[in-house]
Image (cartoon, rainbow, N blue to C red):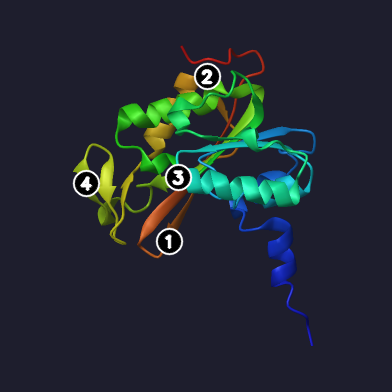
């Protein structure tokens, strides 16, 4: 009888986004790097990094989420100080310029209210990313599901599952990548979830000689 490895795998990797895990597997996120999870929630994407000894930081606007990720870090990486994790929205992050080798923004940028907030969130992630660093994002998009979404205002749309999200498309992501002066590490990859929503993975490298700020 084959044993069930699910509890073992979950204990080691948590509920990490599979596309983020792919960046670890391909050696783009390596031991010794400093990770910052922008919009970290309770830390579902941080279990492996905490266990593996990465220097981990995070922010979330929700106090309960930061309390949860601090408890997680205290259990898996007690050497990390609790103030590595800040209660603050992404666009108002107080981490220093060029603070992290990798910035993660997974399933969070699509909560932007409008274009202004979306760009503020992206710019904040770019600011805290060191030159040569990697920005990993996964967010809702209209790619492949254009006919299924109901526009509300600007890029805010109602999805078939009833949720409301700020939806990017390929043209916008190409435009923002160019504005940042970044370079796509992978082609845009989009998963269409059974005609309910589309999720796009957008991974960008910051040039080695770039300034940390976007102004």
Residue name at image x 45 percent, y 39 percent: 61
**Crowd tier of the residue under label 4, counting other residues whose Cα lies within 10 Å: few below 14, some 14–19, many 20 or above:** some
Q: CA distance from mark 2 to mark 3?
A: 20 Å
Q: CA distance from mark 1 to mark 4?
A: 19 Å
Question: Label 1 belongs to which residue?
Answer: 193
Which residue occupies 51% across, 48% down?
65
Going from N to C along the chain, the mark reached first, 1 or 2, is: 2
Q: Is residue 85 left or right of residue 167?
A: right
SS state under label 1: strand
- Helix, strand or loop at mark 4: strand
Q: Nearer the viewer, mark 1 or mark 3?
A: 3
Dot 3 corresponds to which residue?
Answer: 139
Real-space Cα separation, disc 1 to disc 2, in angstroms: 31 Å
Placement of 14 over or under 8, stated as above or below: above
Contact between marks 1 and 2 (CB within 8 A): the answer is: no
Q: Which mark is residue 167?
A: none
Task: List the residue tagged with mark 4.
Answer: 151
Task: Name the quarter where the N terminus is drawn.
Answer: bottom right
According to the picture, the residue beneath numbered tag 2 turns out to be 181
């Amino acid at each position: 009888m084959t044993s069930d490895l699910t509890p073992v795998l979950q204990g080691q990797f948590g509920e990490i986004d599979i596309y983020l895990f792919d960046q670890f597997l391909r050696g783009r996120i390596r031991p010794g790097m400093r990770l910052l999870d922008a919009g970290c929630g309770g830390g579902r994407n941080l279990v492996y990094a905490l266990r593996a000894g990465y220097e981990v930081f995070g922010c979330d606007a929700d106090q309960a989420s930061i309390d949860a990720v601090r408890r997680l870090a205290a259990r898996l990486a007690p050497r990390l100080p609790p103030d590595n994790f800040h209660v603050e929205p992404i666009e108002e992050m107080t981490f220093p310029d060029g603070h992290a080798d990798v910035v993660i923004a997974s399933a969070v940028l699509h909560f932007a209210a409008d274009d202004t907030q979306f760009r503020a969130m992206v710019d904040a992630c770019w600011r805290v990313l060191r030159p040569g660093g990697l920005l990993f994002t996964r967010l809702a998009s209209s790619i492949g599901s254009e006919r299924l979404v109901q526009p509300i205002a600007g890029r805010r749309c109602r999805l078939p599952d009833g949720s409301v999200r700020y939806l990017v498309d390929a043209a916008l992501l190409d435009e923002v990548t160019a504005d940042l002066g970044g370079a796509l590490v992978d082609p845009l990859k989009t998963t269409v979830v059974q005609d309910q929503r589309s999720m796009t993975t957008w991974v960008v490298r910051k040039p080695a000689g770039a300034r940390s700020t976007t102004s």
